[in-house]
Image: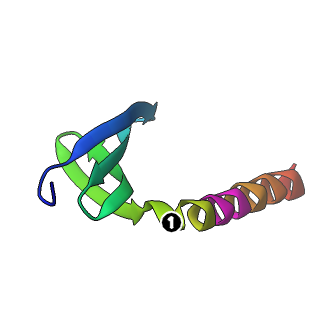
Amino acid sequence: MDGEQKNIKSEKITVERKNFFFDLKENGRGRFLRITEDVRGRRDAIIIPAPGLEEFRKALDSMIDACKDSSNATA
């Protein structure tokens, strides 16, 4: 099963002209999240191993908080 990837869950969001695909997958080495950005046919992806998802979420939450703080400061 090492080369074989099993799809567990997928979601898609669109922001402006970008499509983001979130694919939770599993292979012989474990589970991972693949995040793919598609902009007019050009695709880039990052892969986050499942054990790092909580830390990734914390960093993303921190960025969201900082974004909210900076918009409140300019209002």
Q: Which residue is depicted at the point 15% across and 54% down?
A: 1
Disc 1, SS: helix
On the image, the x and y values in percent for residue 43 come to 21, 50
On the image, the x and y values in percent for residue 39 come to 27, 43
Q: Mark 1 points at which residue?
A: 51
Query: How many callouts does the rendering have?
Result: 1
Q: Which residue is depicted at the point 76% across and 62% down?
A: 66
15 w.r.t. 25: above or below: above
* Side (left or right) of 22 relative to 61: left
6 w.r.t. 48: above or below: above
The foreground one among 40 and 52 is 52
Residue 58 in magenta stretch = yes
Q: Which residue is depicted at the point 88% across and 58% down?
A: 73
* Side (left or right) of 41 relative to 34: left
On the image, the x and y values in percent for residue 25 come to 32, 47
* Residue 14 placement: quadrant: top left
Near mark 1 (Cα within 10 A), the count class, few <14, some 14-19 or many ≥20, is few
**Magenta segment, principal secondary structure?**
helix
Kind of residue at disc 1: Pro
Q: Which colour scheme appears in the figure?
A: rainbow
Q: What segment is highlighted magenta in the picture?
A: 57-62
* Residue 7 placement: quadrant: top left
